[in-house]
Image (spheres, rainbow, N blue to C red):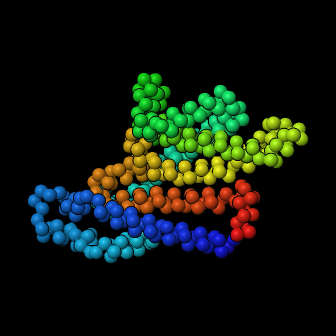
């Protein structure tokens, strides 16, 4: 167990190291010159001033040297200073990260409750209930986030006036009220995926021999579904829920922009538009780190839910 944890930790560090280099290189390969932005634009820009700005921000150094300097600062908690806001990038992330985490948590609760519930109903009831769930989830999966956001704003925000369409509110109830429409638009696609995975996992578990033996021995159907079918189907369901939640950290970009939320997604969009490289690099690194950490946690939890996986890994 200790060796497996050490190997997984080494893999995590290697993945983050490779991802950090790709992020750093990709941002600097983007069109536009940050030195021009830092110098105040091209108006009255002289070669001497441009060279001085490059030297001040170490933009005249080779890419590998710049990456090494940036990585060393990141390891010491220094994410740099924003070109646009002139504030520490860490402070910008600290102020905006709670909004994104609240939105992702709200959307996660929605797609777990309704997605798993719909999948269970489709697997147990079959017939018209199964067809309704499959048809509804197919429609939900085909609607992009920004289209769902526009539709929800037009119907529930403008026409009915039930929910606000901008801002994140204050207090627990105010935050729930303001984040309902963004969370629903973010959770629709995930709900479709989770319901399909739940339905298929339940059907596969219900087709096993021990379930047929339990049913033949007279175990009540409700107990059979809860103790034998759903319990054996939890592994793939929990794994997919974790993967979808991790992917939502990057999926908030469109939703936050559509609803005017001050989260890390909208911060990334503004940083890209203004060539604010330190902010863009920090946000992308944060998203990748969150995804890698969550997926590794899910992989560690999976054997606890399914003893068969734990037995196979022990034998290997």
Residue 277: x and y in percent read 32, 61
Q: The C terminus is located in which quarter? A: bottom right
Q: Quadrant of the N terminus?
A: bottom right
Does any portion of residue 261 appear in the rendered image?
no
Picture quarter containing residue 284?
bottom left
Residue drawn at 19 percent across, 58 percent down: 40
The answer to which quarter of the image holds residue 293 is bottom right
Q: Which residue lies furthest to the right in this view?
A: 217
Q: Nearer the viewer, residue 278 or 136?
A: 136
Q: Is residue 75 visible?
A: yes
Front residue of 301 and 125: 125
Residue 38's spot in the image, x, y percent?
A: 23, 61
**In the shown orientation, is residue 13 left or right of residue 263?**
right
Q: Residue at x 15, y 67 (%)?
A: 49
- x and y percent of residue 261 in the render? 41, 43
* Left or right: 226 in relation to 161: right
* Residue at figure coordinates x 48%, y 37% from the top left: 142
Instruction: Indicate left or right for 89 with 247 as reference.
Output: left
Establish if 148 lies above or below 85.
above
* Number of marks in the rendered image: 0
Residue appearing at x 85%, y 43% in the figure? 214
Outermost residue on the top side: it is 159
Q: Position of residue 170 (x, y in %)?
A: 48, 41
């Amino acid at each position: 167990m200790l060796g497996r944890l050490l190997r997984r930790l080494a893999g995590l560090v290697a993945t983050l190291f490779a991802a950090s280099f790709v992020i750093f290189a990709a941002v600097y390969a983007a069109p536009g010159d940050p030195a021009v932005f830092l110098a105040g634009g091209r108006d009255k820009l002289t070669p001497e001033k441009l060279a001085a700005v490059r030297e001040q921000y170490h933009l005249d150094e080779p890419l590998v040297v710049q990456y090494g300097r940036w990585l060393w600062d990141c390891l010491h908690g220094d994410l740099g200073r924003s070109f646009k806001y002139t504030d520490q990038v860490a402070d910008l992330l600290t102020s905006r990260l709670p909004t994104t985490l609240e939105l992702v948590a709200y959307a996660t609760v929605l797609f777990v409750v309704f997605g798993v519930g719909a999948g269970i109903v489709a697997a147990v009831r079959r017939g018209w209930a199964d067809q309704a769930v499959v048809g509804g989830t197919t429609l939900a999966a085909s609607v992009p986030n920004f289209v769902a956001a526009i539709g929800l704003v037009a119907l529930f925000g403008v026409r009915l006036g039930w929910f606000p369409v901008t801002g994140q509110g204050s207090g627990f109830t105010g935050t729930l009220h303001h984040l309902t429409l963004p969370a629903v638009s973010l959770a629709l696609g995930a709900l479709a995926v989770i319901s399909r995975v739940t339905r298929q996992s339940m059907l596969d578990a219900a087709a096993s021999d021990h379930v047929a033996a339990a049913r033949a021995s007279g175990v009540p159907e409700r107990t059979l579904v809860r103790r034998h079918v759903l319990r054996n189907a939890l592994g793939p369901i929990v794994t997919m829920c974790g993967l979808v939640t991790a992917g939502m950290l990057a999926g908030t970009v469109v939703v936050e922009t559509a609803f005017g939320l001050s989260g890390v997604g909208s911060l990334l969009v503004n940083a890209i538009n203004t060539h604010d490289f330190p902010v863009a690099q920090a946000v992308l690194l944060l998203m990748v780190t969150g995804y890698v950490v969550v997926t590794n946690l899910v992989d560690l939890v999976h054997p606890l839910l399914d003893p068969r996986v734990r037995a196979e890994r022990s034998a290997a």
